Image (tube, helix red, strand yellow):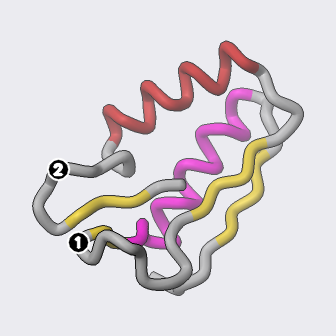
Amino acid sequence: MFVSDSGGRVDNVGEGAVTEWLAAVERVRPTAVHIYTLSKRAARSSLRPAAARRLREIAEHVRAAGIPARVFSGRSS
């Protein structure tokens, strides 16, 4: 799940966070990866969903590593 917050305390959609996450995914070598964000209001009101475009970009990085990826986006961005 990829999200950020309005205060900048939570953000795993930035390039550095995605690069670290992708390195972990490559080590694990799962059969597939599901990439998603918030689809409804979170319990923590400051959390924001990742943009659909960013989710697709992340999926392309995963696919480039030879791992199938599917994007689930509850909101269009």
Q: Position of residue 11 (x, y in %)?
A: 29, 50
Magenta region includes residue 53: yes
Circle number at residue 46: 1
Q: Position of residue 2 (x, y in %)?
A: 47, 55
Residue of label 2: 9
As drawn, 11 above or below 30: below
Magenta region includes residue 55: yes
Furthest toward the top, the residue is 27
Residue at left offset 54%, top offset 20%: 23
Quadrant hosting residue 25: top right
Q: How many marks?
A: 2
Furthest toward the front, the residue is 43
Q: Secondary structure at mark 1?
A: loop
Q: Say if mark 2 contacts mark 1, CB within 8 Å.
A: yes
Which three-letter amino acid code belongs to the residue tagged 2? Answer: Arg
5 vs 15, nearest the viewer: 5
C-alpha separation, residue under disc 2 versus residue under disc 1: 10 Å
Residue at left offset 60%, top offset 62%: 36
Q: Secondary structure at mark 2?
A: loop
Which three-letter amino acid code belongs to the residue tagged 1? Answer: Ser
29 vs 46, nearest the viewer: 46
**Range of the magenta residues?**
49-65
Residue at left offset 51%, top offset 84%: 40
Quadrant hosting residue 30: top right
Residue at left offset 67%, top offset 13%: 27
